Image: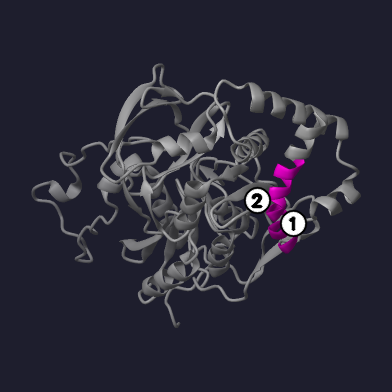
Amino acid sequence: MAVFMHTLFNSLAKLRFLVLPLALLGFPSGAQAAEEEGRLPLEDLRIFADIYNQIRIGYVEEIDDSTLLEYAIQGMLANLDPHSAYLNKDAFEDLQTSTTGEFSGLGLEVGMEDGFVKVIAPIDGSPAAEAGLMAGDVILKLNDKTVKDMTLNEAIEIMRGPKGSSIELQIGRPGESQPFDVTLVRDTIKVASVRERFLEPGYGYIRIAQFQSGTGGDISAALARLMEEEVKGLVLDLRNNPGGVLGASIDVAGLFLDGGLVVYTEGRLANSDARYAARPGDASNGVPLVVLINGGSASASEIVAGALQDHSRAVIMGTESFGKGSVQTVMPISESRAVKLTTALYFTPNGRSIQAAGIEPDIIVERARVTAYDTSRELSEADLSRRLDNANGDRKPEKRVSSDLLATDNQLYEALTLLKGVNILGGRKGPMQGTNKSGS
């Protein structure tokens, strides 16, 4: 046993490179942690060493020390919260490339829940989105392999593959009595972080699919393009946005706020307590704003929605958000591997914890399939023969609201309707107040 313990601690010594990145990030080293939190439990370490030795010498297949220690690291992290994880080479590369907006895969943001892989949100335009996968779906099988009790990394590894290759997923969906199968073809996922357009003259729409490193600049440019024309109201669509880079959420919220706190974090480590504020100057000129969220809106999306709600800058509409209010710190342990560890919790400016609670909309609008009545055959005074003409010579105004929008996206339709109501009532003196025209 003594010889084995010497071998084990020699192997553990090879992991000393863990200490440097943690120290550089302000995390206490192993020695510091021992002094601050008390000595490491020697008896528990002996139990671990004994089990390690039993596996090392008795398992049916020989496994080298490095692999066993890597398994031990994976096991420690897998039993924490769903967002802490050991990132092997492929997972670390995927994390790095996802913040730039282009990577290969199915286009799913996923997490672990009750031993299964749960869909947080499909990415716009991805194979998963095109196949109709939804936030809240649970992946039960991957190519006939049961996902139950797989680690998140193992499931992601199976979902990876070359562009053009296919994979079959068995999906359980809340509200559906039976699971169903869907076949996805892997593709290069190019995430267009920001898209903008006018829904109608005067009413702009901005969609953020994911918070990437350049999203703040993209939103600034999109706002500038929209504000070249008269803008009476804006819709910011954060539905099915799984989050992303924290700094981008601060930048985006700041574009709609004239300074003030956006979010703050609290954790056990001293440097986990931080406050993030918006810069003075509202780039949207204070125009009336509606933010759309749903169960696929997570993390950075919830930071933006929560800040705008607490500052009474926007009406939040849709359904309750996902509730991912925790901060993950990525700590490289080598050039190709890292540990993603939950180190703090997010709080909105008013002190609300987002974690496992989410953002409650000001106005709840469920996604529904709405069919408008056909009113084309209804008669009005204008259709009658020998009618009197309008005394002022006016004609019936043209209808601007598209029935197609009501049928295809009832939540967006309701957001547009609310913005119109604000303008009709002249409610520009309230919290949603805004000027009409850029430069006026």
Q: Report helix, strand or loop for mark 1.
A: helix
Residue nearest the observer in this picture, 158 or 370: 158
Q: Is residue 404 visible?
A: yes
Q: Is residue 327 above or below residue 166?
A: below
| Magenta-colored stretch includes residue 21 | yes
- Span colored in magenta: 9-24
| Magenta-colored stretch includes residue 193 | no
Residue in the picture at 80% in, 58% down? 270
Q: Which mark is residue 46?
A: none
The reply to whether dot 2 and dot 1 touch (C-beta < 8 Å) is: yes
Amino acid at pointer 1: Ser
Graded by Cα atoms within 10 Å as few (under 14), some (14 to 19) or many (20 or more), the crowding at tag 1 reads: some
Q: Quadrant of the C terminus?
A: bottom left
Residue located beneath label 1 in the image: 272
Residue in the picture at 30% in, 43% down? 408
Residue in the picture at 72% in, 59% down? 20
Q: Is residue 326 visible?
A: no
State left or right for residue 139 relative to residue 182. right
Task: Give the Cα distance between marks 2 and 1.
Answer: 9 Å
Q: Is residue 428 above or below residue 134?
A: below
Amino acid at pointer 2: Val
- Residue 81 position by quadrant: top right
Q: Report helix, strand or loop for mark 2.
A: strand
Residue located beneath label 2 in the image: 327
Percent x, y for residue 176?
41, 21
Graded by Cα atoms within 10 Å as few (under 14), some (14 to 19) or many (20 or more), the crowding at tag 2 reads: many
Residue in the picture at 52% in, 66% down? 428
